[in-house]
Amino acid sequence: VLNGDIIDFSALQRKFRKTAEVIRRTALQPAIAEGYLKRLRREHPKARIYWADGNHEARLHNLTLDVAPELEFLVSSGGVASLPTLLKFEQHGVTYVGSYTTPLYIGDLIITHGKHVSKDSSGSAKVEFYDEVSSGVSGHSHRGGVFYKTTSEKVMLWAENFCMCYVDAERRPPSNKQGTQNWQQGFTVIYMTEKKWQMYPIVIERGMFISPEGRLFRHG
């Protein structure tokens, strides 16, 4: 599940200063993302691949509504400038979950990009959990963390799903904060059976992580 903010579209926002380099990189992002989907399908030919828009992908639609609402049909789902068309979802066998805030339900588990950002790990997970009162996974905050809630029937949890962007000050996405950000790179592995699922948050530090099976992976 590619759970949003795969494409930054940093030149399409109005919050941070746009340099010529930011504009140049933004123009390349759709082609890079499509190449990633092509590689992902080639390496995992039998996998089910889901794409959910995050708030950064939504920048394309939002900017169109702001400056040229008459052209919304071009960026809406199915339009020639929509992400499913630009990234060739059908060709690569990618299932489009939907626009920003559209959740994916797998059994009793909710996977959604997320809407909340807390300054502390698990803070956003707690708010997302009480929004849904269900177990789930969200991104958006660029942090990792797990919030647990025990009821009379079961243990529920909500995981913040880290980020995969650069987190060092020189290469990270635009921010209004200087110095070290409280962001963590990582992802979440979920094993599912008919009766049980198990979640393993994986943090990446200095380009390294250890899988649930105990295997060390190292960048480069």
Image: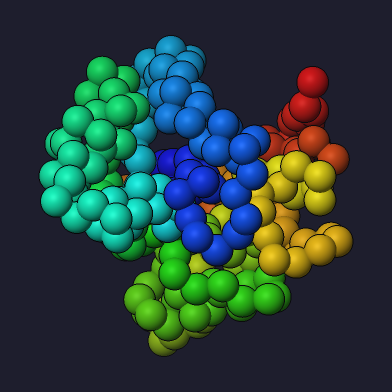
Task: Using residue 64 as the reference point, say whether residue 171 is left or right of it.
Answer: right
Q: How many marks?
A: 0
Quadrant of the image occupied by residue 65:
bottom left
Task: Using residue 124 as the reference point, say whether residue 2 is left or right of it.
Answer: left
Q: Quadrant of the C terminus?
A: top right
Quadrant of the image occupied by residue 15:
bottom right
Scheme by which the image is coloured: rainbow
Report the residue at 38% width, 80% height from top: 131
- In the rendered image, the residue lying farthest to the top is 42
Percent of width and height locating residue 157: 50, 70
Of residue 178 and residue 52, the one placed in the foreground of this image is 178
Residue 198 visible, this angle? no
Residue 45 visible, this angle? yes
- In the rendered image, the residue lying farthest to the bottom is 152
Up-down relation of residue 36 to residue 68 (above or below): above
Report the residue at 48% width, 55% height from top: 13
Of residue 15 and residue 141, the one placed in the foreground of this image is 15
Q: Quadrant of the N terminus?
A: top left
Percent of width and height locating residue 119: 68, 76
Of residue 64 and residue 200, the one placed in the foreground of this image is 64
